[in-house]
Amino acid sequence: MLTLAVGLMGCDLRTPPPVPVTPPPITTPEPLVDPVEEPSQASKDLTTYYARLQNDLLTQGLLRGDGGGADTPFSDTQLARNFVRIALFNEYRDDSDFQRPQATISNLRRWTQPIRMSVEFGNTVALAQRNVDEASVSTYAARLSRVSGVPIRMTDRNPNFHVLFLGEDDRRGYGDRLRELIPNISDATVRSFVNLPRDQLCVVIGTFSPGQSSYTKAVAMIRAEHPNLMRSACIHEELAQGMGLANDSPGARPSIFNDDEEFALLTIHDELLLRMLYDPRLQTGMTPATAAPIARVIARDYLAVGAS
C-alpha cells in the first residue's frame, strides 16, 4: 500500500481530454404476453349455465358441505354395503365413452405407490383462479393422504396423478396432450373426453398395468366454467374416485358418491370408505366375493369405536 501511494503521488495529475461516450441505443421492451386467452362464447354460455345450475341445487337444499349429521345416520351394515357397491364396481367400462354410466364388477383397485400430484391449467383459466385451484387441490390432497395413509405430494416432477382445469376451448384441443399423459388410452375415450356433454360435470381416468389392480396413473378433469362450490365438488369427488372409490351408488348416504347431488364435499361416511379401501386387511386385486366379508368386519370395527 505504501509503494502504491508513493507512486500515485509522483504521477502526472493533468486531466486527460474526455473520451466521447456513445449513448446506448434506446430499446423498446417486448410487450408481456398474457397467458390467459379470451374464452369463446360457448365457454361463456357454459359459465352462465353452471352458475344457474348451482343456484338451483342450492335452492333445493342440495350441495351440502356439512359432512352429514343427525339427519343422515348409517349403520355398519350400510357402510359395508356401500363400500362393496362403490369400491368393487366401476361407474364406466374401461373403454368407456362417458355417455352413459354402466356399472361393471371389479376387483379391489387402489394405489400401492406414492402419489405425485400435479395441477395443470388450460389457457383460458384466469391467473387468480389458478392460485385458488392450486391451493384447493393441495389442501384436499393432504386430507386424502391423511385419511388413506397413501403418501401424496404436490410436484411437477414426473407426476402420476394429473389434475386438469380446462375450459371448453382448452378441452376440445386436448386430445394429443391426453395421449401423452395416458399413452394406451383408447381413441373412443379421447373422443369422449374432447366432446364431453355439458351434463358431465367432471371426469377422472385411472390406468393400470395389464392384468394388475394397482393404479399407475390417473387424470382428473374439472371444467373451468364451474362456479366455486361446483368446482370444489368436482375436486372432492374426482380425486377421491381416482383413489379407488370408482363407482356411484344411489343408496349411499351421506355421500358424494351419489348422483343426487345432496352433498358437495367429502363426508364422514366417505372418509370411512376411503379408510376401508386402504385398510391392510384388504389386499389389492381381491375379488368382491373375498373382499365383501372382510369389509363387513372392518365396518363393524370402525363404527364400534364411534367412528361415525
Image (tube, rainbow, N blue to C red):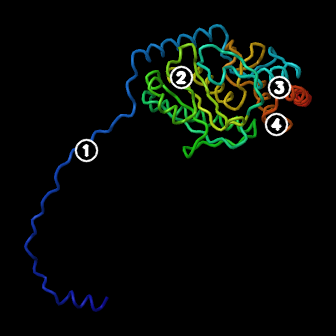
Determine the CA span between mark 1 and mark 4.
60 Å
From the image, tell me which residue sits under label 3.
288
Taking the spot 79% from the left edge, 32% from the top edge, the residue there is 277
Determine the CA span between mark 3 and mark 4.
11 Å
Secondary-structure class at tag 3: helix
Residue 96 lies, with reference to residue 182, above or below; the image says above
From the image, tell me which residue sits under label 4.
283
> Are the two marked residues, 2 and 4, in contact with CB atoms closer than 8 angstroms?
no
Taking the spot 78% from the left edge, 34% from the top edge, the residue there is 285
Q: Nearer the viewer, mark 1 or mark 4?
A: 4
From the image, tell me which residue sits under label 2.
193
Of the numbered discs 2 and 4, the one sitting upstream in the chain is: 2
Rendering coords of residue 100 (x, y %): 63, 13
As drawn, the label of residue 29 is: 1
Rendering coords of residue 122 (x, y %): 46, 30
Is 1 situated left or right of 248 in this image? left
Q: Nearer the viewer, mark 1 or mark 3?
A: 3
Residue 264 placement: quadrant: top right
Q: Nearer the viewer, mark 2 or mark 1?
A: 2
Between 285 and 304, the residue placed more toward the observer is 285
Between 81 and 271, the residue placed more toward the observer is 81
Of the numbered discs 2 and 1, the one sitting upstream in the chain is: 1
Name the image quarter holding the N terminus.
bottom left
Between 174 and 289, the residue placed more toward the observer is 289
Residue 245 placement: quadrant: top right
